[in-house]
Image (spheres, rainbow, N blue to C red):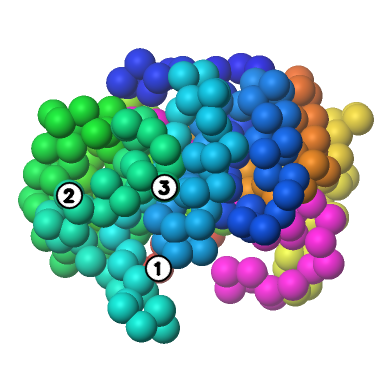
């Protein structure tokens, strides 16, 4: 397993484990997570929002006795309504400072390695958010912080005003919007990038073509076929798509959504392939012109 280093010194596996798809009732969770660690994965990403905290609980249980060998990333900002009917956005200092204790309890740990703001808009009280995160760093409850966002204006704001260590953002061959600006901005500022959605909800791993981010079903099918034609020998569609993300020099880790043993095996198989050459990545980019952000620029 290859590891990339965040500016806070954390060495992060180039494939990490997105826990959102795990369900609390799945009896295989512990074994899947143990196998991931054995395979070299050392970053596990969750959020207090997922299954109303149950996702954090299952991860904390699975990591008993293994905590010192892994990094945990979780998120804050979406607050469940009292009646359980949905959630609301709450990027307030008081909420962040209280929500961390609930996450620590569910994860059965004394600290979070990477605490992410779970979304955000340019109208949020960024000063409050940053002050809350800095206070949590000073208290030792978190070791570093960042944001989870696809919005260039929000990402730019935190790059300019805070000490974020990483940004989680969506990036794949079907969503090349970050290539326009944000990846270079983060790379220039030595800020890590946690790329989610690398296989575009399965569309880049053999799923039947469907519309995606403004692309028609036909356009998605054409991109799938183009990728298949340009794959290096011995690569599956999903492996090629995942390597395209991992081998971008500005990407720290591809956060693979994993629910089953098979999905874990596929993620580890992609990591085990030879990196794409720059020429091969350019071949992939030639399949289509790519997309750009229309809003929140």
> How far, Cα to Cα, is label 2 from label 1?
34 Å
> Would you say the magenta stretch is mainly helix, strand or loop?
loop
* Residue occupying image coordinates x 21% and y 28%: 140
Q: Tag 1, which secondary structure?
A: loop
Specify which label sits upstream in the sequence, 2 or 3: 2
> How far, Cα to Cα, is label 1 from label 3?
38 Å
- Residue 35 lies left or right of residue 77; in this view the side is right
Crowding at dot 1, Cα within 10 Å, few <14 / some 14-19 / many 20+, comes out as: few
User: Which is nearer the eye, 214 or 21?
Assistant: 21
Q: Which residue is mark 3?
A: 106
Q: Which residues are magenta?
A: 191-216
Is any part of residue 239 visible from this angle? no
User: Which is nearer the eye, 98 or 136?
Assistant: 98
Image position of 126 with respect to 164: above or below? below
Mark 2 touches mark 3? (CB < 8 Å)? no
Q: Tag 3, which secondary structure?
A: helix
Q: Which residue is mark 1?
A: 294
* Residue occupying image coordinates x 22% and y 40%: 159
Task: Give the image location of residue 146, x and y in percent.
Answer: 30, 41
């Amino acid at each position: 397993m290859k590891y990339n280093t965040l500016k806070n010194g954390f060495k992060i596996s180039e494939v990490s484990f997105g826990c959102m798809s795990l369900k609390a009732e799945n009896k295989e969770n512990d074994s899947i997570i143990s196998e991931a660690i054995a395979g070299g994965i050392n970053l596990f990403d969750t959020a207090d929002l997922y299954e109303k905290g149950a996702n954090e609980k299952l991860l904390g249980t699975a990591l008993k006795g293994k905590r010192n060998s892994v990094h945990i990333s979780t998120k804050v900002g979406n607050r469940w309504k009292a009646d359980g009917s949905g959630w609301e956005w709450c990027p307030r200092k008081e909420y962040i400072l209280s929500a961390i204790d609930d996450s620590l309890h569910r994860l059965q740990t004394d600290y979070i390695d990477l605490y992410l703001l779970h979304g955000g808009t340019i109208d949020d009280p960024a000063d409050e958010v940053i002050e809350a995160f800095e206070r949590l760093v000073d208290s030792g409850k978190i070791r570093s912080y960042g944001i989870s966002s696809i919005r260039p204006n929000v990402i730019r704001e935190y790059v300019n005003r805070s000490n974020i260590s990483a940004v989680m953002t969506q990036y794949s061959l079907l969503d090349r919007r970050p290539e326009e600006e944000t990846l270079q901005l983060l790379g220039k500022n030595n800020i890590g990038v946690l790329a989610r959605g690398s296989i575009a909800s399965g569309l880049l791993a053999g799923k039947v073509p469907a519309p995606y981010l403004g692309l028609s079903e036909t356009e998605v099918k054409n991109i799938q076929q183009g990728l298949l034609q340009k794959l290096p020998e011995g690569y599956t569609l999903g492996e090629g798509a995942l390597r395209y993300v991992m081998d971008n020099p500005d990407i720290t880790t591809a956060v693979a959504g994993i629910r089953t043993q098979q999905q874990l095996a596929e993620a580890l198989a992609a990591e085990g392939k030879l990196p794409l050459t720059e020429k091969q990545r350019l071949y992939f980019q030639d399949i289509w012109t790519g997309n750009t952000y229309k809003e929140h620029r």
